[in-house]
Image (cartoon, rainbow, N blue to C red):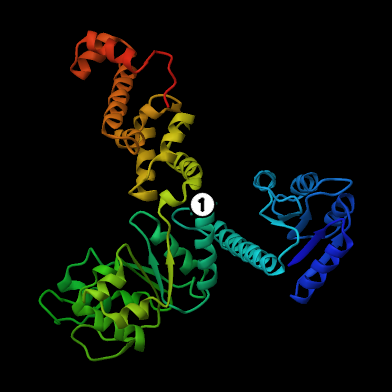
C-alpha cells in the first residue's frame, strides 16, 4: 500500500516514514499542504496520514481537496489538538480515523492494517461485482453497503476453490443467488448448476432424488433415473434447506461427499460424483448437532467455508437501490417513491427480508393509482410497525389511532362524513379526535 505522510514537522515525518518503511509500506512525504496536493496528483496513494495544523493549508482544506480529486482515498488525521469536537469535524470531512500527537506507533500500525483490510475487501467485492455484471443471471445482486461488500469479498475468495460452502441466513436473504454467483465464479462455471430443495422432497423419495434409481428398484420405478448428483457432474450441486435433510440419509450424503462416489437405489455399481457442493440453511446446524438431529461429521464436511448473509434490517442502506431495481422490474409506468414512503420503508424491520420487499413493491405499484407512491399506499403492517415500535402502551395505541384516522380521511378525500362512517364512529367523535391529534387536511404525514 502506498502511503503519503503530510506534516510540517521534520522529526515527525522522519519517525513515521522510517517506522512504516520497516513495516513494508511504500512511503512518500510532504512538508506542507501545497506540496501534498502536488504529490497526490503525481502518484496513486491509497492512504494519507495528515497533520491537522499546518502553516499554509489546514489538514481540513488538504483533505477536502484530496477527496475532490479522489473520493476513495483513505485518510487518518493527526493532531496535537485532540478534542472530541475536532474528531467529529474531521470525520465529517471524510477522514477515516483520528490520532493525537505524540503518535502511538503500535496504535497507528493497527489502524493502517485495518484500513488495508477494508481496501482489500472493497477491491475483491468490486471484482466479484464486475464478473457478475458481465454474466447472465436470473436476477442482479443489488447492494453497495458494507455488509454486502463483505459477502461479495468472501464469495470472490472461496469461489475458485473446490471447498464445500455453507450459506447461512434467514429466509429471503438471497442464498440461492449467492450460490449461483459462487458457481459462476468457479472453475466449473461451464458445467450445470443443479438445485435441490431438501425441505420439499418426501423422505421416501429423497434417496432416489439425490442418487437416482434402477428400473424395478421399488414400486413405480419403471425406468432407470439419474439423480441430482449425476446431473450435477462437473458442475455445482446446491442443497437448499440442508437442515431438513432426514437423519437416515445423512450417512449416505456424507459418503458421497467423502468418496465422490454414489450408487443408484437398486444398484451396486459405483458412479463418479465429482461435484462442487454448496448448501444453505436458515436453521442453526450447530444446535441441531447438539440435539442429535444432524450428524456432526456431516456438519464439518459441509461447513468447510461458511458465509452468513445479512438480513435486510442490517443492510438498510441498500433499500433505496433495491426499490429502484424492483420498480424497473415490475412497474409498467414511471413511478417514484415519495420521501415519506421511503422513510417508512427504511424504518421497517422486514422479517421476510429482500423477498418481502420485492413482493411489497410488486403489490404496491400494481395497486397504486398515482405516479408518486406515498406512505398511505404501503401495507398496514409497514405503517403500523413504524408507530408501534417505541413508547408505552398508551402512546402506541394513540399512534395507531392517529394513523387509522389519517388513512381513512385520505382514502375518503377528507370528506369527514364518509371517513367517520368507514371508521364506525360519529362525525362529532371524528372531529374531536382530529383536534386531539392536530390532524388537518394539509398536514404532511410523518
Q: Is residue 429 left or right of residue 33?
A: left
Residue at 30% across, 70% down:
285
- In which quarter of the view is residue 311 placed? bottom left
Residue at 48% across, 53% down:
140
Q: Is residue 91 left or right of residue 242?
A: right
Q: Is residue 107 left or right of residue 311?
A: right
- In which quarter of the view is residue 256 placed? bottom left
Circle 1 sits in a helix, a strand or a loop, which is it? Answer: loop
Residue at 67% across, 48% down:
87
> Which residue was labeled with disc 1?
143
Q: How many marks?
A: 1
Residue at 33% across, 56% down:
171
Q: Position of residue 29 (x, y in %)?
A: 85, 62
Q: Would residue 300 be visible to someone looking at this image?
A: yes
Quadrant in which the N terminus is drawn: bottom right
Q: Is residue 348 above or below residue 42?
A: above
In this view, the residue farthest toward the left is 219
Quadrant in which the C terminus is drawn: top left
Q: Is residue 396 above or below residue 233?
A: above
Q: Position of residue 390 (x, y in %)?
A: 35, 37
Who is closer to the viewer here, 227 or 411? 411
- In which quarter of the view is residue 429 placed? top left
Q: Residues within 10 Å of mark 1 (few under 14, many from 20)?
A: some
Q: Would residue 332 be visible to someone looking at this image?
A: no
Q: Position of residue 80 (x, y in %)?
A: 76, 53
Q: Position of residue 292 (x, y in %)?
A: 21, 77
Q: Is residue 203 above or below residue 171?
A: below
Amino acid at each position: 500500500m502506498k502511503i503519503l505522510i503530510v506534516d510540517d514537522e521534520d522529526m515527525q515525518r522522519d519517525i513515521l516514514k522510517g517506522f512504516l518503511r520497516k513495516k513494508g509500506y511504500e512511503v512518500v512525504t510532504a512538508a506542507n499542504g501545497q506540496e501534498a496536493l502536488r504529490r497526490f496528483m503525481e502518484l496513486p496513494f491509497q492512504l494519507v496520514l495528515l497533520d491537522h495544523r499546518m502553516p499554509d493549508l489546514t489538514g481540513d482544506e488538504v483533505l477536502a481537496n484530496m477527496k475532490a480529486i479522489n473520493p476513495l482515498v483513505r485518510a487518518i488525521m493527526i493532531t496535537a489538538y485532540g478534542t472530541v469536537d475536532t474528531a467529529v469535524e474531521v470525520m465529517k470531512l471524510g477522514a477515516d480515523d483520528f490520532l493525537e500527537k505524540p503518535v502511538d506507533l503500535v496504535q497507528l500500525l493497527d489502524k493502517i492494517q485495518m484500513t488495508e483490510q477494508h481496501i482489500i475487501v472493497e477491491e475483491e467485492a468490486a471484482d466479484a461485482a464486475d464478473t457478475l455484471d458481465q454474466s447472465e443471471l436470473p436476477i442482479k445482486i443489488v447492494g453497495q453497503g458494507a455488509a454486502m461488500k463483505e459477502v461479495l469479498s468472501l464469495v470472490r475468495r472461496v469461489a475458485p476453490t473446490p471447498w464445500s460452502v455453507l450459506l447461512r441466513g434467514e429466509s429471503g436473504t438471497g442464498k440461492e443467488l449467492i450460490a449461483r454467483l459462487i458457481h459462476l465464479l468457479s472453475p466449473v462455471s461451464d458445467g450445470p448448476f443443479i438445485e435441490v430443495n431438501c425441505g420439499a422432497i418426501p423422505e421416501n423419495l429423497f434417496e432416489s432424488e439425490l442418487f437416482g434409481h434402477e428400473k424395478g428398484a421399488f414400486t413405480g420405478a419403471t425406468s432407470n433415473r439419474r439423480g441430482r448428483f449425476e446431473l450435477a457432474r462437473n458442475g455445482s450441486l446446491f442443497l437448499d434447506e440442508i437442515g431438513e435433510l432426514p437423519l437416515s440419509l445423512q450417512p449416505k450424503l456424507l459418503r458421497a461427499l467423502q468418496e465422490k462416489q454414489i450408487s443408484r437405489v437398486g444398484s451396486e455399481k459405483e458412479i463418479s460424483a465429482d461435484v462442487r457442493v454448496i448448501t444453505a440453511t436458515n436453521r442453526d446446524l450447530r444446535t441441531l448437532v447438539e440435539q442429535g438431529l444432524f450428524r456432526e461429521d456431516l456438519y464439518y464436511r459441509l461447513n468447510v467455508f461458511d458465509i452468513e448473509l445479512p438480513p435486510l434490517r442490517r443492510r438498510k442502506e441498500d433499500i433505496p437501490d433495491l426499490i429502484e431495481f424492483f420498480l424497473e422490474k415490475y412497474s409498467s409506468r414511471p413511478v417514484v417513491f415519495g420521501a415519506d414512503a421511503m422513510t417508512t420503508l427504511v424504518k421497517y424491520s422486514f422479517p421476510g427480508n429482500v423477498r418481502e420487499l420485492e413482493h411489497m413493491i410488486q403489490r404496491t405499484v400494481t395497486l397504486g393509482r398515482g405516479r408518486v407512491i406515498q406512505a398511505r399506499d404501503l401495507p398496514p403492517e409497514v405503517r403500523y410497525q413504524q408507530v408501534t415500535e417505541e413508547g408505552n402502551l398508551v402512546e402506541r395505541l394513540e399512534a395507531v389511532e392517529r394513523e387509522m384516522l389519517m388513512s381513512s380521511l385520505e382514502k375518503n378525500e377528507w370528506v369527514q362524513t364518509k371517513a367517520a362512517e368507514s371508521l364506525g364512529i360519529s362525525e362529532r367523535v371524528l372531529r374531536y379526535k382530529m383536534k386531539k391529534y392536530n390532524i388537518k387536511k394539509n398536514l404532511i404525514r410523518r
